[in-house]
Amino acid sequence: MINYVTIGVSNLEKATEFYTNLLEPIGGKLLFDGGRIRFFGTSMAEPMLAICTPYDENAPHPGNGTMFAIAPGTRAKVDELYALALSLGASDDGAPGERVKDFFYGGYVRDPDGNKMVFNYFGK
């Protein structure tokens, strides 16, 4: 159902490096470079994450209550990507752990532009 989610970034090159390194361990890569917008994912036929400099040329800013989720497939991968994101310059917004017993495990970070994301796994 979801085709892609777009977030605004202040420095497209730095953000490209951040997301390239962050998503590579789970098969993600840069799929399309449209100049001011770039799409990451595993295939153009699967849900993607797009980063862009805002079309209106105003400064980007994270939305209040806006967040996107990346599902790496296991709890161990949640922990791994959370740590990787921090090492790449993300800030902690909630260490990995069970949020809903035996159902939802997640670790929250904010990318260098302040965009909030969660690495999550559903299940035990």
Image (spheres, grey):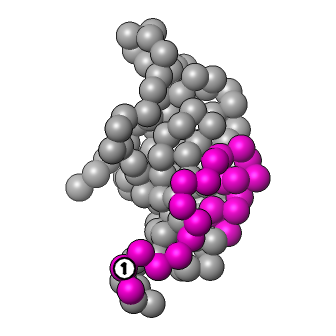
The crowding category of the residue bearing disc 1, from other C-alpha atoms within 10 Å (few below 14, some 14 to 19, many at least 20), is few
**Which of these two is toward me, 24 or 68?**
68
Image x and y of residue 106, in percent: 48, 69
Going 54% across and 54% down the picture, which residue do you hit?
A: 93
Q: Residue at x 44, y 11 (%)?
A: 58
Residue 64 in the image, given as x and y percentages of width and height: 35, 38
Outermost residue toward the left in this view? 1
Rendered residue at 59%/42% (across/down): 111
Is residue 12 visible in the rendered image? The answer is yes
**Image quadrant assignment for residue 27:** bottom right
Q: Is residue 38 visible?
A: no
State the extent of the magenta-drawn residues as a range.
Answer: 80-101
User: Is 15 left or right of 49, judged from the image as shown?
Assistant: right
Relative to 18, 115 lies left or right: left
Residue that sits furthest to the top in the current view: 57
Q: Could you tell me which secondary element the residue under label 1 belongs to?
A: strand
Find out whether residue 88 is within the magenta segment.
yes
Which quadrant of the figure contains the C terminus? bottom left
Residue 70, placed above or below residue 48: below
Q: Is residue 57 above or below residue 78?
A: above
Q: Position of residue 19 (x, y in %)?
A: 62, 44
Q: On the rendered structure, is 118 left or right of 66?
A: right
Nearest the eye: 85 or 19: 85
Residue type highlighted by circle 1? Val
Q: Residue at x 38, y 10 (%)?
A: 56
The residue under label 1 is: 100
